[in-house]
Image (cartoon, helix red, strand yellow):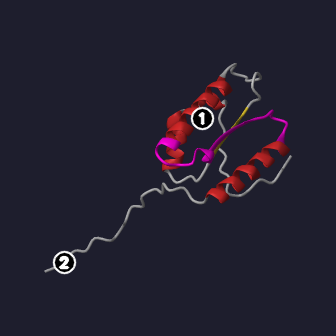
Amino acid sequence: MRAQYPANIRIIKLPCTGKVSEIHMLKAFESGADGVYLVGCEEGNCHFLTGNLRARKRVERVKRILEHIGIEPERLAMYNLSAGEGTRFVQYAKEMTEKIRELGPTPIKPKKQEIGTERFEVQ
């Protein structure tokens, strides 16, 4: 459909949202993502039977972890739609982007390696 979604969205394609573990979501935040959302098959219509249901449970667990460590759980979401619903995908992308803009940058920022900051004394 060549629909335009916000440029700040980074898409990672997987065969099923059931392949996304809690650690993947947490690593995204640790790497500096201000928000993360999964888009999977409609519930009850998963090609891998229950992958999207497993993903939904994992998203809920990670939301509880985020809340426990002081990060807004709204920074993580899961949406379900069919492959032919490109306009809804764009709507979800815009909705999530707006929600993250309202929340502001994540309090977790990756540590940058400082290169060339060491001083050596030559005698």
Q: Which numbered marker is on residue 99?
A: none
Looking at the rendered structure, the kind of residue marked 1 is: Val
In screen coordinates, is 79 left or right of 4? left
Q: Distance between the residues labelled 1 and 2?
A: 52 Å
For label 1, the SS is helix
**What residue appears at the point 77 percent right and 29 percent down from the top-left corner?**
42
For label 2, the SS is loop
Along the polypeptide, which appears first: circle 1 or circle 2? Answer: 1
Residues under numbered marks 1 and 2 in contact, where contact means CB atoms less than 8 Å apart: no
Q: Nearer the viewer, residue 33 or 60?
A: 60
Q: In the image, residue 14 lies at what x, y percent?
A: 65, 35
Q: What stretch is highlighted in magenta?
A: 67-86
Looking at the rendered structure, the kind of residue marked 2 is: Glu
Q: In the image, residue 121 lies at what x, y percent?
A: 18, 77
Pointer 2: residues within 10 angstroms few (<14), some, or many (20+)?
A: few
Residue topped by disc 2: 121
Q: In the image, residue 7 lies at what x, y percent?
A: 71, 58
In screen coordinates, is 100 left or right of 42? left
Pointer 1: residues within 10 angstroms few (<14), some, or many (20+)?
A: many
Residue topped by disc 1: 59
The reply to whether the magenta stretch includes residue 28 is no
Q: In the image, residue 106 lies at what x, y percent?
A: 54, 56
Q: In which quarter of the image is residue 76?
A: top right
Q: How many labels does the image show?
A: 2
Of circles 1 and 2, the one toward us is 1
* Residue 74 position (above or below residue 123): above
Q: Which residue lies furthest to the left in this view?
A: 123
**What residue appears at the point 60 percent right and 35 percent down from the top-left corner?**
59
